[in-house]
Image: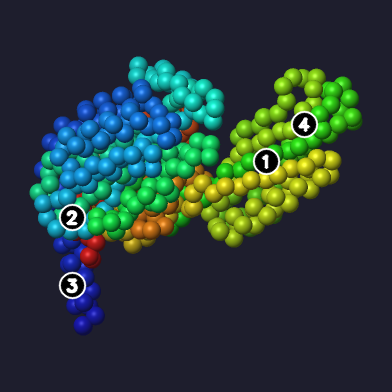
Amino acid sequence: MKSLRTLGIMILTLLTTVVVAQDNKQGLDSAFAAIEPRVIEWRRDIHKHPELSNREFRTAKKVADHLRSLGFDDVRTGIAHTGVVGTLRGAQPGPVIALRADMDALPVREQTGLPFASTARGEYNGQEVPVMHACGHDTHVAMLMGAAEVLATNRERLAGTVKFIFQPAEEGAPGDEEGGASLMVEEGVLAGPDAPEAIFALHVWPNRGGTLAYRSGGFLAAADDLRINVVGRQTHGSSPWMGVDPIYVAAQIMVALQGIPGRHLDVTKGPAVITIGSVHGGVRGNIIPDKVEMVGTIRTFDPETRELLHTKLRDTVRATAEANGATATVTIKSYAPVTRNDPELLRKMMPTLRWAAGDDKVTEASLITGAEDFSFYQESIPGLYLLLGVNDPGVAFGEAPANHSPFFDANEAALITGVRTLVGFALDYAQVSGD
């Protein structure tokens, strides 16, 4: 009898917590309706003026000016080069959380045909390149700016403090520069008197519009940057036997690498991917060059698998080069660990997801071999990372251009769901953090 009574009290407490959290958000529909056109306007402006990693000067100024106009308690700029952190304290005491958006664009030539399409140019690793928000970070910034305004104008509902983190260089700092989430953490965004105890973020994704996809535990892959330099011996293209052809050796290496995930790793521990995305060597067709550079990425979900893959990769590259009279060096640099959703935090915030998107639009996702440096925040505090579907109506998953495509676009009608979700996290966390 005692155990049944205890169970009843626990259920009543949980239901009361959910009801209180829902009540705290009642009457906000007009605020969301008012902010939606502004979110779309901000998104289009940022989309038209994209900036590469560690060069987000215009975007950072737009964000900082907006936060200051809302009367934020503190707005700091220049963090990790161009990052902006704003602090908003609620009218009621409570915990500190963080909401994060990334600001950088990619060296991609936009081909969407949108009236606000980017024609911007920038410099990437010493080359002039086109620039595009091909991963949707323009929407992330706009949604978090919208959430900031809704919360700032409803401080009386907010228990605790929210740190708004607008982060540069999620796509990776250029060249030998430092940047991104790891540098934000190093420069103290999770420390000090307003140190957050949990952090939340969204990423737009080519799925059914307005859906929120989650996964408990490991969600996005760990990523390593890969660089392979093959050195041969230059000679005339008509007499390849007079030299050592590094292009031929590089081709053999690329083929051999694909056998590592499929034949040397335990696939039951999680997927693994090796991709070579850039190959440079030679200047004309009748000269065999003396060197070739290959640049790629590695994705894994299991630490032991990652270590074994690195070992096999180095051995394969070295042996293939030696067998052909060439030499090769391998450089592997960690980009980000696995992005994981804290199971307990996800459980507590699930009613918020359903409130923000609707019961039928909250779905569990499979593992994703994409990577995110949001995982560096999660090494210090619990975090929750969700995917917001932004396909047009009637377009299913897999039918729309993927992130990093020159044709990638977002259905702007879905962005208000992202704003609702971010606002919900801020208003509900204090209600459920003690359950």
How far apart marks 4 and 1 lie (CA) works out to: 14 Å
Above or below, 243 against 378 in this view is above
Where residue 326 appears, as percent x and y from the top left, is 80, 40
Chain-order first, disc 1 or disc 3: 3
Where residue 72 appears, as percent x and y from the top left, is 18, 42
Disc 3 is placed on an element classified as: helix
Point out the residue furthest to the bottom here. 1
Q: In front here: 237 or 419?
A: 237
State yes or no: discs 1 and 3 in contact (Cβ < 8 Å).
Answer: no
Mark 2 crowd level (few <14, some 14–19, many ≥20, 10 Å Cα): many
How far apart marks 4 and 3 lie (CA) works out to: 75 Å
How far apart marks 2 and 1 lie (CA) works out to: 49 Å
Q: Identify which amino acid the numbered label 2 is placed on.
A: Gly
User: Which image quadrant: the C terminus?
Assistant: bottom left
Residue behind mark 4: 290
Can residue 354 be spotted in the picture?
no
Mark 1 crowd level (few <14, some 14–19, many ≥20, 10 Å Cα): many
Mark 4 crowd level (few <14, some 14–19, many ≥20, 10 Å Cα): some
Disc 4 is placed on an element classified as: loop
Residue behind mark 3: 9
Above or below, 415 against 161 in this view is above
Residue behind mark 1: 228
Q: On the rendered structure, is 377 left or right of 352?
A: right
How far apart marks 1 and 3 lie (CA) works out to: 61 Å
